[in-house]
Amino acid sequence: HYKSKHFKPSHHQQYHSGSNPVSSRGLSTRRELYERDFPVYKQPVEVGSFSLDSRRRFFNDARQLRYYVEPDKEPNFDLRDGYKDRFIKRDDSVKEKLDHILRWILANRSKLSSKSAENKSCALDVDFVTWRGHLTKLLTTPYEAREGWLLAVTRFRDTLYISEVETEAARRERENRTGRHEEMMYWGYKFEQYTCADTVHSSPDPGGVVNTNEAFCTVVQTRLADHRLLFSGEVDCRDKDPNAPGPPACYIELKTSAEICTPKQRSNFHRFKLLKWWAQSFLPGVPRVVAGFRDHDGVVVSVETFPISKISHLIKNEQNCWKPTVCMNFCCDFLSFVKQTVTEDDPSVVYLFSYEPHRDVTYSLHRDSQYSFLPQWYMEEITR
Ligand code: 0WD
Ligand code: CA
């Protein structure tokens, strides 16, 4: 589905004449409105990467990138091991907003802005800057019946910056997690430790400490229809074969999921989990997800690879299933809606876009509010 030029429709066209998704209420999230040709989505290109260390310090390099070591097909990894005594958890009440990406932009400006007659001020040559995770939420919105979202948008020197704001519901959920839920959040990171090595030639160290402050993030550039995007996403590891293709094609996304025992569980896995997995990895062009299926006690009983390009075929037999084209067209229309709406070019102005399940996307405008998110250091440095 990546396009370098134009896309030849492989499935039937379904235009809905006269049904503009934007109304006075906002942007519709009804799936039917987005069932048209797959939009142009250019092959994402990695333009850089950065690392966050065990103390969440930023480095403009790939020091935290790890190497995937293929586990046994039936591995018996105990994901509960180390939760009590070898776990350092990132403080998720600290909101970092776009700060790490902005640091990366300042350190790599020459890659992003062309000094030309039309671009005297040396503005960024992109329309949108955001986290991959925010775009994933947009892609899955037409199918999201449980969780709403809030996205703050600021136009600054003609680039639109999108940064998530935690909803009241999400904050309540974060502050009231059960002990079981807290522990299960650790399982995903523990699985990474069982399957990732620090260097090409070393082995995973399941006896080490899991520290969720550490991260390796890729920065990619691409285009969705006429929207030029720059976003960053956390990458779990890469293929350790030196002959593997270059990034992002060598990257691997790791997941854990409850083992599938019944047809109902299989159907739910296809309809809900694969949607999230597909959206998250398709965006940056990460070609595969390696899934560890675990039992109720957190023991990984099997490991399976899901090529992202095969996921849309896997789900085709599912009734009432999600469609990649709906996801991409909704995201595209949302970005057009944002471009149209966010007209004031001012870092102290935030347009807050809001989604509640089964409702249209609406927005409100805020001046000099708690929602402003572009830091002084960024605006000063970029305007120099
Ligand atoms: O709201 C967000 N998603 C923000 C994320 C706001 C500001 C900063 N960040 C940071 C995260 O802490 C992380 O370093 O950005 C990085 C991830 O960004 P992303 O790739 O755009 O996020 P997403 O695709 O949602 O998540 C990728 C991975 C997750 O892997 P799984 O397999 O669970 O999807 O990033 C990790 C997690 O491993 N991650 C986080 N780690 C700690 N705290 C968090 C978080 N809040 N969110 C994602
Ligand atoms: Ca992961």
Image: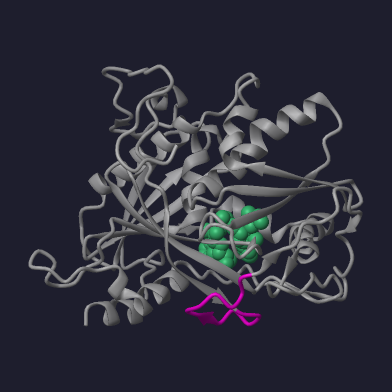
User: For the stretch drawn in magenta, what is the main secondary structure?
Assistant: loop
Number of dots carrying numbers: 0
Q: Is residue 206 magenta?
A: no
Residue placed most toward the observer, 132 or 196: 196
Colour scheme in the image?
one colour
Height in image: 20 above or below 384? Answer: above
Side (left or right) of 34 relative to 280: left
Height in image: 284 above or below 11? Answer: below
Residue placed most toward the observer, 289 or 210: 289
Residue shown at the point (50%, 78%) measured from the top left: 61
Residue 249 in view here: yes
Height in image: 2 above or below 352? Answer: above
Side (left or right) of 299 relative to 158: right
Residue 74: x and y in percent read: 89, 48
Q: On the image, which quarter does residue 82 sit in?
A: bottom right
Residue 171 in view here: no
* Residue range (magenta): 53-65
Residue placed most toward the observer, 218 or 150: 218
Ligand 2 is found in the corner quadrant, namely bottom right
Q: Quadrant of the C terminus?
A: bottom left
Residue 52: x and y in percent read: 57, 76
